Image (cartoon, rainbow, N blue to C red):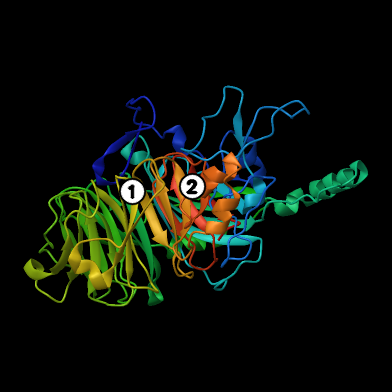
Amino acid sequence: MMLRGRGHRPVSMATAKREPEVLPPEVLPPEVLPPEAASCSLRAKMAPRKSARRRSSRGGRGPVEPHGAPVEPHSAPQSPTEPPSRVYIPGVGPPLGPDEELVMDEEAYVLYHRAGTGAPCLSFDVVRDELGEGREELPLSLLLCAGTQAPTAQGNRLLVLKMQNLHGLRRRGGGSSSDEEEEEDEEEDDEDGERQPQLLLAMAPHYGAINRIRVTELGSMGPVAAAWSERGQVEVVALGGALEALGGLEGGGGLLLKEQPPLAPLCTFTGHMGEGFALDWSPTVSGQLLSGDCAGRIHLWRPRGGGWAVDQRPLLGHSASVEDLQWSPNEASVFCSCSADASLRIWDIRAPPPRACRLVAPGAHDGDVNALSWSRSDPFLLSGGDDGALRLWDLRRFHTGSSVATFKQHRGPIVALQWHPMASGVLAAAGADDLVTQWDLGVEADDEEAAMGQSDPQVEALAALPPQLLFLHQGERELKELRWHPQCPGLLLTAGRDGVAVWRSASV
């Protein structure tokens, strides 16, 4: 089976075999993995830049444990004669030994949960709920919409998920006696039922894999989703019925599943020249949508009479696949695009299609440009490409065609990135190297701290990382999508081979 990335470039997951035309095992009911399950596997959840026994602080963000990466290589309980555990940093220092494994540093996380989606998930988006803004109190409840990529076209599903009762990681106090530990274990056993995470899932059949899905709120219509299909068409569907089905599910912890009939599209556009991945709803004009395909064409959707009018005249300029699109958060007529032709382009839809492209950065990256994000609070664009670099663009200087900063930590292509919706200068990026990085571009190097670590090889290795790098997380497989939750500060969601992971680091 193949899990495809954007730009129609397959990435092998396993031996390619054609499955029979039956419901594949990948669409069996998903599950929510509690943090305890996640920490027992070989997956390494990377912590902020610290070891389990050593913390460093950096001004500006409280006790910032800058750079993620403290996972301890671990083989067996250490005896007094065994060497101490060491910090593992991807790409830095010696590789793991034959008897070593990576162990999650749970102190580095506020919470971690994962919901399996059955078949691999290429894309998802957050559905805003009515539980309030800026909520951090645990347990959390989330609404998501996702699309699958099953081995067969008829095996795919459009999913509406509600992950609820998401508690944080348990913390044990140090220096407890054996009697106190037994009492704590008994109390935890009593709490297990109350702390059991729950997944409510409405599944609607969708013929063909869903390359990209984006959700918006449309007044009385409620939340709607635009879905890019591998069949070369873009559909808009209402999610109200699926959300009502979730409301009717009741029970204890675990999985509650509701099969839905196919969602009737509100609008379907088949005018693209093949399939695509780029899709974005306007944050300033309700119902206005952009879709871009692998032939380099971009089409504008405008709401009209309860539906949409799609301009048949494509916006042309890119010579290869349009990988991502992003509307300006402030100017209703302006958007940016990135492409496998290595360029970034800024457009203004007030101009006729032949003249809508206003600015171009022709060599934005050394290779395909896969993802971009437009800051809501600053005049900056962020882009990520096949070169593994994150590039920062000042819109006031975009006409020069040069970025103002480059950050390189990933050892593979950047597949997704996004600015934090509330914290200026904070961002997250996911790479084909199965790493998720969190950054704060407002952090500067601390010369005094670097000098203090010169005598300690591990501290020196950490000091060699970019000072803006807050956190490294690994353990997810074949990442394809990343989103900050807009209503839960610091909560990050990622999607890949194993489903959708929900976590919050101690650094953001």
Provide residue 197's location: percent of width, then percent of height: 64, 51
Provide residue 70's location: percent of width, then percent of height: 59, 44
Provide residue 246's location: percent of width, then percent of height: 53, 58
Q: Amino acid at mark 2?
A: Ala
Q: Is residue 15 above or below residue 396?
A: above
Residues tagged 2 and 1 counted as in contact (Cβ below 8 A) = no
**Rendered image: mark on residue 464:** 2
Question: In the image, what residue occupies the spot 60% across and 30% down?
Answer: 101
Front label number (2 vs 1): 2
Label 1 crowding class (10 Å Cα cut-off): few <14, some 14-19, many 20+? many
Considering depth in this image, is 52 or 151 the residue closer to the camera? 52
Q: Is residue 208 left or right of residue 130?
A: left
Q: Is residue 142 left or right of residue 37?
A: left
Q: Is residue 246 above or below residue 206?
A: below
- Badge 2 marks a residue whose secondary structure is loop
Q: Amino acid at mark 1?
A: Ile
- Look at the image and tell me in which quarter the N terminus lies: top left
- Badge 1 marks a residue whose secondary structure is strand
The residue at which mark 1 appears reads as: 210
Question: In the image, what residue occupies the spot 34% across and 25% down?
Answer: 17
